[in-house]
Image (spheres, rainbow, N blue to C red):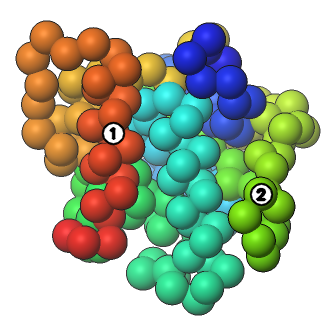
Amino acid sequence: MDAHHLVPWFPAWGVRFPEPVKNVFSIVSIINEWRPSNRWMMLAYEAAASEVHLWTAWYALRRNEASGEMVAKTPDAEFLRLISGTRQINKAFERAGIAIDDKCAWIVMLPDSELGDDFGEFSIPLESYNESTEEAIRLIEHLGGSLIPNRPTPTTSGLERIGSGSLEEARIVEIEDFFLSHLALSDLR
């Protein structure tokens, strides 16, 4: 957690693959075979900007699930769609899913915590990262990868990857704001 955003770590674990991805389907197949549910997924490493970015996407996912307004059929695909800032599922996988030559990615667990009915009733599930770490490590081992001891950081290459365009000489806070703005447009494009 950084000093600017006092939020808990999102349940995401960086994984470095033993070699760059040559076959996306084989990597996704391993995750699909061993994940406990479709609330576990892989996300392109550059597509995650920060804890706030991931929690914001997760909140939008839970809101869409609760209201029955998901565009995608599953929570993992809906989360990718939101991160990608698009209504198009195929484009979401292209932008925020793993791709050929990726060297690393995030293994993500999407908590199914309730949001509450009224303003202020919701609180971020504080222990979701710690409670899911053992399962995440098991998935990393099945991939033959290694845990990356970093947290998400906003980058201009990440903005380009998710289809938001590029910035030059922007501060990290400004880059994060662009990620959040891109996410907010996901139901408009």
Do labels 1 and 2 touch, CB within 8 Å?
Answer: no
Residue that numbered label 2 is attached to:
120
Question: Residue 24, can we see it?
Answer: no
Q: Which residue is drawn at 61% across and 14% down?
A: 2
Corner quadrant of residue 179? top left
Identify the image quadrant of the C terminus: bottom left
Circle 2 crowding by C-alpha within 10 Å: few under 14, some 14–19, many from 20: few
Is residue 138 toward the left or the right of residue 172 in the image? Answer: right
> Outermost residue, front direction?
119
Q: Which residue is drawn at 22% across and 26% down?
A: 157
Numbered disc in front, either 1 or 2: 2
**Residue kind at label 2, given as amino acid type:** Gly
Q: In this view, does 56 lie above or below 132?
A: below
At which x and y percent is residue 65?
Answer: 62, 78
Identify the image quadrant of the N terminus: top right
**Tally of numbered tags:** 2
At which x and y percent is residue 173?
Answer: 37, 20
Q: Residue at x 84, y 38 (%)?
A: 126
At which x and y percent is residue 98?
Answer: 37, 44
Residue that numbered label 1 is attached to:
179
